[in-house]
Image: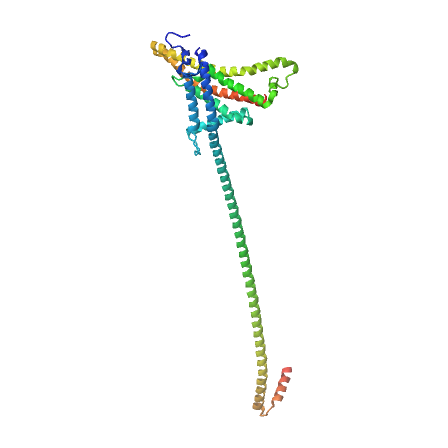
């Protein structure tokens, strides 16, 4: 896939070790991806702790943003899961903020998009999937298996419905992880592809270079929207899965 | 595709777990409770202020009602006082009028009586004068002395005709 000039649009996703680290035989190197992961973590912590002043009856801009994020996720959880979703609020909030900040940091020039790493998105999706399944079994015991045979389905359809339901349940983490990964990867690749056209065509003549430039500008706006939207979608789907586990359809 | 190179899966997964768990703990035990507290504090404060405003409004309304009722009361009292004063003045006037009437009646009677007495006295005197005049006239005319009794009897006889 690599090209001679090193301008491959996929090079931006290349992971390289920055600090070698390991425990025994395990390679736990701090890579460029890990550094941006840590940056996102640090920024979320700064965002949610530094700007909150207890005495501020009237919030400033940054505090308003923090409060809006809080209420946004709290309402999302309330709407999708209801009162029983309260204990999972910190998890959903963490999930949303982490993905949002990773996505947004990826929009910085020369940065690295953590959420374009399939291992990261799948790990997050698996945490949601496994967590939700555990919640389901804790809540309903073995009765959670009834989840795979929805109410009102005639008995003779059971052999058909149950495998479909199980399959659709098991496919959730795949679709959840793949969606985030694919959106971010495709978007950033597209940005790079169009950006790669700007200079060569621009050298030719000013107008042909301006066309991909305009596309890049448009795509940048789109990518910002996607960065937010995908974080939102991930969090909403997690809420919906949680709802299924708690209320059984 | 660089994302599918297997060697970086483990380190990324490991550090993701570290970051995410760390972030979760900070969010769950530090950041979110603080934000939540700020929000509930504000909500309480706003509710308190609204309650205070509502109470102040009710107080103002009560004060208005009190003021109006006291005004009404004062008006009623003034009306009674005026009524009483008018009644009293009318009574007093009537009483004085009656007293005046009685006084005038008495004076009138006294005057009448005095007039009657005077008239009687005058009439009595008149008889004496007439007798005297009759005696004097008889003596001058006839030279005869007539007694008072005769003159009186003659006068009475004249008066009866």
Residue at image position (46%, 28%) is: B30
Residue at image position (43%, 11%) is: B2
Task: Please determine whether, in this image, residue B149 is positioned above or below residue A53.
Answer: below
Q: In which quarter of the image is residue A49?
A: top left
Rendered location of residue A215, percent (x, y): 41, 14
**A162 relative position to A174: left or right:** right
Task: Please determine whether, in this image, residue A37 is positioned above or below residue B1.
Answer: below
Q: For the image shown, how many numbered marks are present on the structure?
A: 0
Rendered location of residue A201, percent (x, y): 36, 10
A144 or A221, which lies in front? A144
B50 or B61, which lies in front? B50
Task: Please determine whether, in this image, residue B8 is positioned above or below residue B42.
Answer: above
Q: Quadrant of residue A80?
A: top right
Rendered location of residue B3, percent (x, y): 45, 12
Regarding residue A229, the answer to whether it shows in the image is no
A118 or A228, which lies in front? A118
B106 or A229, which lies in front? A229
User: In the rendered image, which quarter contains the N terminus of chain A?
Assistant: top left
Rendered location of residue B83, percent (x, y): 55, 57
Q: Quadrant of residue A102?
A: top left
Scheme of image coloration = rainbow
User: In the rendered image, which quarter contains the C terminus of chain A?
Assistant: top right
Regarding residue A138, the answer to whether it shows in the image is yes
């Amino acid at each position: 896939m690599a090209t001679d000039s090193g301008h491959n649009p996929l090079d931006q996703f290349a992971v390289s070790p920055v600090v070698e680290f390991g425990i025994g035989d395990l390679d736990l190197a701090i890579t460029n991806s890990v550094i941006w992961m840590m940056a996102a973590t640090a920024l979320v912590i700064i965002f949610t702790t530094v700007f909150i002043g207890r005495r501020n009856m009237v919030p400033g801009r940054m505090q308003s943003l923090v409060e809006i994020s809080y209420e946004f996720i709290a309402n999302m959880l309330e709407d999708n899961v209801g009162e029983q979703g309260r204990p999972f609020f910190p998890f959903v909030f963490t999930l949303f903020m982490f993905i949002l900040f990773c996505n947004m940091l990826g929009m910085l020039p020369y940065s690295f998009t953590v959420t374009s790493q399939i291992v990261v998105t799948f790990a997050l999706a698996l945490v949601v999937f496994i967590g939700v399944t555990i919640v389901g079994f804790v809540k309903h015991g073995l009765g959670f298996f009834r989840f795979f045979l929805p109410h009102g389905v005639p008995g003779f359809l059971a052999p058909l419905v149950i495998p479909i339901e199980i399959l659709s349940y098991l496919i959730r983490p795949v679709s959840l992880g793949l969606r985030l990964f694919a959106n971010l990867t495709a978007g950033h690749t597209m940005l790079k592809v169009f950006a790669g056209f700007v200079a060569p065509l621009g050298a030719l003549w000013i107008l042909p270079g301006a066309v991909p430039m305009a596309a890049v500008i448009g795509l940048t706006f789109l990518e910002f929207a996607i960065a937010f939207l995908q974080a939102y979608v991930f969090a909403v789907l997690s809420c919906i899965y949680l709802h299924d586990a708690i209320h059984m359809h | 595709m660089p994302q599918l190179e297997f060697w970086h899966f483990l380190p990324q997964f490991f550090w993701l777990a570290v970051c995410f768990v760390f972030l979760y703990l900070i969010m769950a035990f530090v950041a979110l409770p603080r934000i939540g507290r700020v929000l509930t504090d504000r909500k309480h404060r706003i509710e308190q202020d609204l309650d205070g405003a509502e109470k102040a409004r009710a107080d103002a309304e009560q004060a208005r009602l009190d003021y109006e009722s006291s005004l009404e009361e004062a008006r009623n009292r003034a009306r009674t006082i005026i009524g009483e004063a008018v009644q009293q003045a009318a009574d007093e006037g009537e009483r004085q009028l009656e007293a005046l009437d009685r006084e005038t009646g008495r004076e009138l009677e006294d005057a009448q009586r005095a007039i009657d007495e005077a008239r009687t006295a005058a009439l009595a005197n008149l008889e004496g004068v007439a007798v005297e005049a009759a005696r004097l006239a008889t003596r001058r005319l006839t030279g005869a002395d007539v007694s008072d009794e005769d003159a009186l009897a003659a006068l009475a006889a004249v008066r009866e005709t």
